[in-house]
Image: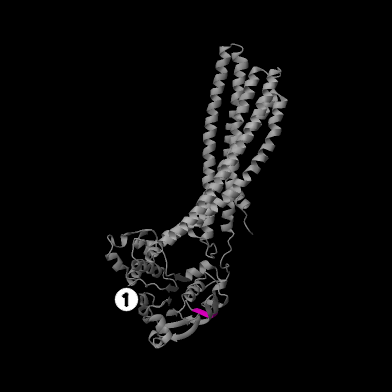
């Protein structure tokens, strides 16, 4: 069932309903007490000041002091509970977005920075609704207390507040509509700008290498300018929203004060009642200001909830399956009439324990092959089976427990070299096979040397060797490696080829590469030309073919 922005908002509030309800109770007590302050002052004037009784004056002053103590305590506790509810709701939403983005079925395809913005900024805005709702309830409580008190003083005054409040709230809702629309556009532009900036920073070395810095700067300038325009439009909507509500509130309060003044002049209410009525009229600025703030936050929260719903509703790239793979898996991989993207009727198999090389003359064909083997995408035609089980019928998470696809552009994580290589029993042998020991010798603290985000503190060849060691350390029944040594010198590459063949002995390994050193260590090589099987044999046998030499030896 499709999740709407309204549903996201409702679930966020429902998940924190106890905290929100308690916070609303406390803040309502605070606003109700605030409304009583001018009433108590009016009583002091009528009973103590007008009567000249010092004892009565001291008694009412003590009551006023207790009232202020209660106000302070209830506000602090209510605000704390509301903020906690807001943060917890935002945390839950971040988890929801994170689970969707990391779902084995994939499908949440957006710029990385844009997804980060949805999981942080938008989640915080939706969560904040839980923090402002108690204050909305508190403002309503203050209005009700004011209306009841005014009714006891004068029926016309009380009815004016009671009957005038609903239209005021409806007008506030209508005034908030433009702000909601422009806030959504602002968040979209801001998130896209964040995504572009993240991509540019991640590819900074490549941009410098090809001399494309100016084009990258121009692209980000255009994106940032669009984001700025959307932000300014949202700011203008916010200013208009606040100004309109302030004017509306001022007119309403002026009407209340005018009616109260006329009643006092006619002798229908006492001097103390007039002071209380004027004080209540001034107090009404507070709840209506609260409504203005709450309405603005709700408008922005609804816009952000819609963006979160879009991420949660993104259809998975592959469906879940109910078939199971054998445990332990033998690792017999078979492709039958496989077709997807650049692939055309591909048929080959990797036998259990075999080290199979795959040479693709078209990089797109290599990418499509990797996607099908790791079930990042399902074939358009044909099948991929492991141990005679069609992978399209197996849950993606289970597929990836058996088949590990190590992409060419795999990133490292912030931490040490050793932490990036894993901690399992094969971690040390994997580092040796991938020649990470040579990398460690060149680093100040060996394998305990800290690695920056994405491994940028290491050279390209060092990053590749650490990433390869990480993949080998998993000891997956089927390991698919894509060009793992393109940034490594030939001598080191030959050593890695030998170490890889030795460490993966008895385990199925598929090497999608054009490296002669790696292909020479394979048991068999399959040649894909124009997305079709063009040849099969050992590296030495295929080296006699012109198309193979063009792909591998050129």
Crowding at dot 1, Cα within 10 Å, few <14 / some 14-19 / many 20+, comes out as some
Q: Which residue is mark 1?
A: 490
Above or below 233: residue 109: below
**Residue 361 percent across, percent down from the top left:** 45, 79
Residue 537, located in which quarter of the rendered image?
bottom left
In this orientation, which residue lies closer to the viewer: 377 or 423? 377
Tell me the quadrant of the picture where the N terminus can be found. bottom right
Q: Which residue is depicted at the point 68% across and 35% down?
A: 165
Q: Is residue 539 magenta?
A: no
Tell me the quadrant of the picture where the C terminus can be found. bottom left
Q: Is residue 336 magenta?
A: yes
Residue range in magenta is 333-337
Q: Which residue is depicted at the point 48% across and 59% down?
A: 112
Above or below 283: residue 408: below
* Prevailing secondary structure class for the magenta stretch in the rendered image: strand
Can residue 134 be seen here? The reply is no
């Amino acid at each position: 069932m499709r999740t709407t922005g309204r549903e996201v908002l409702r679930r966020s509030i429902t998940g924190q309903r106890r905290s929100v309800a308690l916070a609303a109770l406390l803040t309502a007590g605070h606003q109700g007490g605030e409304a009583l302050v001018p009433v108590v002052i009016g009583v002091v004037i009528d009973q103590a000041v007008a009567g000249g009784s010092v004892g009565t004056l001291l008694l009412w002053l003590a009551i006023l002091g207790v009232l202020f103590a209660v106000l302070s305590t209830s506000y602090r506790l209510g605000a704390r509970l509301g903020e906690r509810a807001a943060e917890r709701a935002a945390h839950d939403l971040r988890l929801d977005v994170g689970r969707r983005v990391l779902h084995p079925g994939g499908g949440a395809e957006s710029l990385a920075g844009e997804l980060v913005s949805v999981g942080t900024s938008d989640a915080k805005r939706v969560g904040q609704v839980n923090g402002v709702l108690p204050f909305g309830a508190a403002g309503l409580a203050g209005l009700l207390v004011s209306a009841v008190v005014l009714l006891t003083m004068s029926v016309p005054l009380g009815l004016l507040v009671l009957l005038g409040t609903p239209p005021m709230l409806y007008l506030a809702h209508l005034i908030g509509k433009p702000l909601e629309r422009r806030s959504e556009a602002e968040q979209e532009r801001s998130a896209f700008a964040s995504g572009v900036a993240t991509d540019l920073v991640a590819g900074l070395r490549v941009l410098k290498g090809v001399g494309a810095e100016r084009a990258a700067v121009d692209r980000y300038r255009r994106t940032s300018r669009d984001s700025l325009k959307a932000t300014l439009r949202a700011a203008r909507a916010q200013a208009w929203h606040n100004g309109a509500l302030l004017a509306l509130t001022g007119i309403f309060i002026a009407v209340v004060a005018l009616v109260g003044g006329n009643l006092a002049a006619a002798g229908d209410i006492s001097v103390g009642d007039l002071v209380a009525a004027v004080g209540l009229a001034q107090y009404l600025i507070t709840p209506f200001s609260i409504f203005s703030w709450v309405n603005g936050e709700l408008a922005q929260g609804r816009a952000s909830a819609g963006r979160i719903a879009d991420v949660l509703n993104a259809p998975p790239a592959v469906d879940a399956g109910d078939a199971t793979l054998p445990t332990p898996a033998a690792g017999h991989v078979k492709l039958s009439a496989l077709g997807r993207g650049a692939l055309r009727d591909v048929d080959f198999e990797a036998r259990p324990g075999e080290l199979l090389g795959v040479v693709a003359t078209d990089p797109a064909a290599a990418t499509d092959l990797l996607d099908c083997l790791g079930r990042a995408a399902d074939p358009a035609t044909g099948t991929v089976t492991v141990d005679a089980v069609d992978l399209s019928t197996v849950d993606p998470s289970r597929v990836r427990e058996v088949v590990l696809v190590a992409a060419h552009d795999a990133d490292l994580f912030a931490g040490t070299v050793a932490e990036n290589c894993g901690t399992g029993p094969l971690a040390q042998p994997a580092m040796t096979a991938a020649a990470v020991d040579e990398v460690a010798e060149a680093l100040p603290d060996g394998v305990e040397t800290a690695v920056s985000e994405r491994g940028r503190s290491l050279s390209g060849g060092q990053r590749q060797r650490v990433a390869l060691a990480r993949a080998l350390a998993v000891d997956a029944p089927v390991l698919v490696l894509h060009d793992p040594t393109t940034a490594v010198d030939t001598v080191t590459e030959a050593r890695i080829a030998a170490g890889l063949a030795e460490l993966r002995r008895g385990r199925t390994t598929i090497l999608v590469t054009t490296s002669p050193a790696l292909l020479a260590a394979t048991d068999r090589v399959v040649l894909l030309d124009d997305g079709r099987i063009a040849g099969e044999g050992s590296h030495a046998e295929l080296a006699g073919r012109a198309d193979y030499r063009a792909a591998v030896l050129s």
